[in-house]
């Protein structure tokens, strides 16, 4: 997720070249389900795809977050070009400033044909711009779990988005390093510090953090929010709602006030020399080269890039240690992002044809595991080769998965939250100041 805006304009006939991974930067190659030869995406006719209903020329503007999937989406667009050669998809992506840029486009009336938001609460934020996909063919292949977070939280109606992926959130660690040092992956907050001391003594940097990116903080914090809710005897949704109503304070919950900040402090102490200057590329380099033993805020989307650095890298995946109870060290699963279709698009039918093909065609369904390397948001029996997904599946089955807490707030809030935490790390504000600012922003979430 680089700060620099990536603008990718695809037009004319494009040559297919299948890249594996999660789309974060070029990644190692992996075979597609129907590829005729290595490194080549399956032609539409070979995959048995049907041509979309309309042969008219159309130009679709796709503006979404998550540039880590840029390469994979490029492959998707190239494959669709073979199915619908008269359709051009202009694809633009960014991350850090996406909420601000999207709102500027909406306010100016330049609504993209496809745009993205967080699923859950943000479904209603952009509902007035979004096509209700109920009745579209894609809803028959969409998993029930994904449908649930694409519906309006207000009344449970409609399906206002599709997902690029399901996700697992947790800690990625280097199994070989942990075995060499003779320690297990920590499952309690106290075990984190002890593990860091042993890793450092053995000559390894315990953490690489990516704290230059605001979104890393939301990925980490949601684990502590889930634990706080569980220990308070309420749902995550209820806890977040109490913050939004101004009824709760961070200091009311030791999982947040003590443990989350302690965890961030440890990550800074035992992490990158310049944490606020370390972004995704820095994390990939530190972890992929074996310098750092644990990487924060990432998931399956970085695996292919890491293996491109070291194909022999032994990747481990585990839940965050959030309290003194090892049972609360759980991975989080779910679909955190929604792609929305502009209901007033001049290219509405062409756009619907594209997303329906994506979710229902043989190529489109195989794309999730074979190209993007993600948890499929569609009903699928295809097994992923990615260790984060395999281990996430196993951990979810054995220990359960915690709630996708980030879906109960908006990305505008998460961006401000990340910026507050960056100020805390920089030493510009105290912990109590940070908590007060977070509470203030949570109470203003409907205005963000």
Image: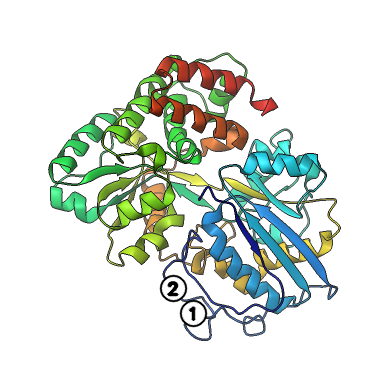
Looking at the rendered structure, the number of numbered marks drawn on it comes to 2
- Residue at figure coordinates x 46%, y 16% from the top left: 433
435, above or below 342, in the image: above
Q: Secondary structure at mark 1?
A: loop
Q: Which residue is mark 1?
A: 39
- Residue 155: x, y in percent? 74, 35
Q: Is residue 181 left or right of residue 402?
A: left
Task: Say if residue 120 shows up in the picture.
Answer: yes
The answer to which of marks 1 and 2 sits earlier in the sequence is 2
Q: Which residue is mark 2?
A: 29
Report the front residue among 161 and 438. 438
Task: Say if residue 157 shows up in the picture.
Answer: no
- Residue at figure coordinates x 54%, y 36% from the top left: 406
Dots 1, 2 in contact, CB < 8 A: yes
Report the front residue among 412 and 176. 412
Report the front residue among 184 and 59. 59
Q: Is residue 294 left or right of residue 143?
A: left
- Residue 167: x, y in percent? 50, 50
- Residue at figure coordinates x 52%, y 35% from the top left: 405
Q: Which mark is residue 263?
A: none
In which quarter of the view is residue 17 placed? Answer: bottom right
Image quadrant in which the C terminus is located? top right
- Residue 82: x, y in percent? 69, 79
- Give the Cα separation between the discs numbered 1 and 2: 7 Å
Q: Is residue 159 left or right of residue 244?
A: right
Q: Residues within 10 Å of mark 1 (few under 14, many from 20)?
A: some
Q: Residues within 10 Å of mark 2 (few under 14, many from 20)?
A: some
Report the front residue among 141 and 416. 416
């Amino acid at each position: 997720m680089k700060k620099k805006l990536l603008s990718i304009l695809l037009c004319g006939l494009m040559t297919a070249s299948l890249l594996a991974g999660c789309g974060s930067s070029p990644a190692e190659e992996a075979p597609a389900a129907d590829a005729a030869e290595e490194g080549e995406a399956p032609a539409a006719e070979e995959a048995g795809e049907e041509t979309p209903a309309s042969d008219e020329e159309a130009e679709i503007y796709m503006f979404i977050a998550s540039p880590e999937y840029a390469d994979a989406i490029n492959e998707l667009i190239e494959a669709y070009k073979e199915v619908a050669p008269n359709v051009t998809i202009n694809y633009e992506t960014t991350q850090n400033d996406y909420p601000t840029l999207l709102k500027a486009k909406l306010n100016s009336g330049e609504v993209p044909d496809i745009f993205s938001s967080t699923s859950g609460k943000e479904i209603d934020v952009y509902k007035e711009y979004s096509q209700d996909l109920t009745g579209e063919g894609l809803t028959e292949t969409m998993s029930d779990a994904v449908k649930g977070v694409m519906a309006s939280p207000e009344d449970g109606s409609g399906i206002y988005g599709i997902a690029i992926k399901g996700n697992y959130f947790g800690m990625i660690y280097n199994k070989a390093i942990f075995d060499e040092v003779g320690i297990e992956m920590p499952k309690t907050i106290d075990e984190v510090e002890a593990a860091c001391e042993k890793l450092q003594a053995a000559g390894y940097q315990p953490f690489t953090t990516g704290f230059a990116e605001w979104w890393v903080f939301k990925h980490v914090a949601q684990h502590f929010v889930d634990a706080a809710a569980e220990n308070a005897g309420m749902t995550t949704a209820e806890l977040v709602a109490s913050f939004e109503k101004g009824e709760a304070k961070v200091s009311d919950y030791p999982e947040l006030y003590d443990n989350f900040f302690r965890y961030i402090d440890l990550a800074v102490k035992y992490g990158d020399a310049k944490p606020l200057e370390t972004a995704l590329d820095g994390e990939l380099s530190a972890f992929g080269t074996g310098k750092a033993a644990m990487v924060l805020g990432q998931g399956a989307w970085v695996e292919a890039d890491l293996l491109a650095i070291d194909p022999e890298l032994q990747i481990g995946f585990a839940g965050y240690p959030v309290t003194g109870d090892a049972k609360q060290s759980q991975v989080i699963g779910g679909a955190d992002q929604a792609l929305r279709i502009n209901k007033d698009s001049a290219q509405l039918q062409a756009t619907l044809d594209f997303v329906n093909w994506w979710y229902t065609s043989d190529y489109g369904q195989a794309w999730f595991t074979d190209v993007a390397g993600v948890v499929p948001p569609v009903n699928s029996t295809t097994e992923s080769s990615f260790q984060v997904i395999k281990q996430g599946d196993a951990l979810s089955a054995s220990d359960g998965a915690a709630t996708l807490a980030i879906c109960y707030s908006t990305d505008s809030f998460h961006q401000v939250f990340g910026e507050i935490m960056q100020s805390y790390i920089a030493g510009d504000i105290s912990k109590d100041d940070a908590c007060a600012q977070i509470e203030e922003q949570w109470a203003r979430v409907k205005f963000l």
